Amino acid sequence: MKKVFDRFYNLIAVICCLLLIGVLLYAVSLLPSYGEENPRSVEVVERYVEHGLEETGATNIVAGMILDYRAFDTLGESHVLFTALICVIILLGKDKKNMRREYDSYYTVEAESYHLLQTDTIVRLVGYVLLPGLFLFGIYILLNGQLSPGGGFSGGAIMGAALIIFAVAFGFETVDRVFTEKLLKTVTFVALSFYSFAKGYVFFTGANGIDNHIPKGVPGAILSGGLILPLDIAVGFVVACTMFGFYSLFRRGSIGHDITFMDQQ
Amino acid sequence: MISHLWINNEETAAVILFGIGFTMLLFQKNLLKKLIGMNIMDTGTFLFLASMGYIEGRKAPIVTDGVLERTAYINPVPAGLVLTGIVVSVSVTAIMLSLTVRLYKRYHTLDLDVMYERSGHTAEDR
């Protein structure tokens, strides 16, 4: 039975893969040539490019698009990240109930110090040099999202990476002093609910033809673009917390505090 | 058709990457290799979207000198779509990696067939 299944599985799988690649290549051969404008898709682009600056106040048209015209799309993305973080906490988070020795012992090193990162002199020195620059770079990209390439997701990812390097260079116990699980949950919750309510307000007033009294600012200045800058900051905090949360959960099964094997005592 | 595939070489490469990832999903028994295949599929999608937005000789859609003509900038819509794709890819990868960790803790293997047998089934009754 198994052999028959395996033979047919391989045959059908090969046919499926070749069919998929063939159909996709045929579709590519019907697409407009690379580097030329598709004449069927100009209407939306025209609207975004020609009216984007006066309607959103952002010189970066992509930022104006994803955080103003399509802000609910970005809200959904932030919630996808948040949901992923919650799922990873549920699956990998360790507490007294789900610490089962017979499952854990196989892949974890038994030593107490396994979950503590070994801080190394070279890594710590590099951390001293790199970390201020990394955090500043992340904040710069976060705050200039409406003016230049960047914004909430890229700035937040750089800040999350800087937090991870901070943990690697100085140990989890240093990060735990400022970055606890409660702080992560509070920051994520406040950022997401601020985003939801602010954008809900703007869409509600816009749909009913009411002026929303949010100043657009001078295009090109740092305080321009209406709600884009605060929304960028909210998204950036969510992304940074999620990145560091993933790392911390995969590394030691908790955020903000160490849990060593409790059932040993 | 073949010459048009050569003109669209970036899209062709993206589609072939997508196919390679799909093939890995079907043929690999190891869960981590399946995950790598899915990431290759994601990468193919991003390359496809980025190359669809590119228009020869135009600039990135950032207004610096007051030009507000559609013909001056590339298509900004695929950039937003790629952003969505990257976020979803990161989230799905994280969730599936943590599921893999839990499965490894339970069955002490990454091979799907061995996992199936260790979960109490025999190899014959699938």
Image (cartoon, coloured by chain):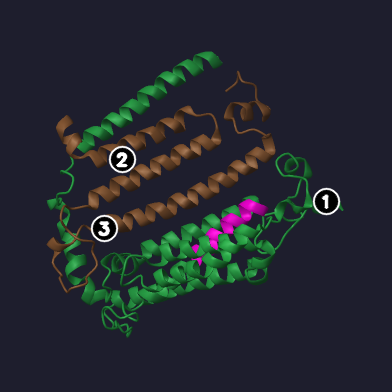
Cα–Cα gap, marks 2 and 1: 50 Å
Cα–Cα gap, marks 1 and 3: 54 Å
Q: Which chain is painted in brown?
A: B
Which quadrant of the figure contains the N terminus of chain A? top right
Amino acid type indicated by mark 2: Ala
Residue under circle 1?
Answer: A263
Q: Chain of mark 3?
A: B
* A1 or A179: nearer the viewer: A179
The answer to whether the residue labelled 3 contacts the one labelled 2, judged by CB atoms less than 8 Å apart, is no
Report the mark closest to the observer, 2 or 1.
Answer: 2
Q: Chain of mark 1?
A: A
* B107 or A245: nearer the viewer: A245
Q: Chain of mark 2?
A: B
Occupied quadrant, residue A55: bottom left
Q: Is residue A168 visible?
A: no
Q: Residue at x 32, y 34 (%)?
A: B16
Highlighted range, magenta? A237-252
Secondary structure, mark 2, is helix
Residue under circle 2?
Answer: B14
Residue under circle 3?
Answer: B77
**Lateral position of residue A23 relative to residue A82, left or right:** left
Q: Main secondary structure of the magenta part?
A: helix
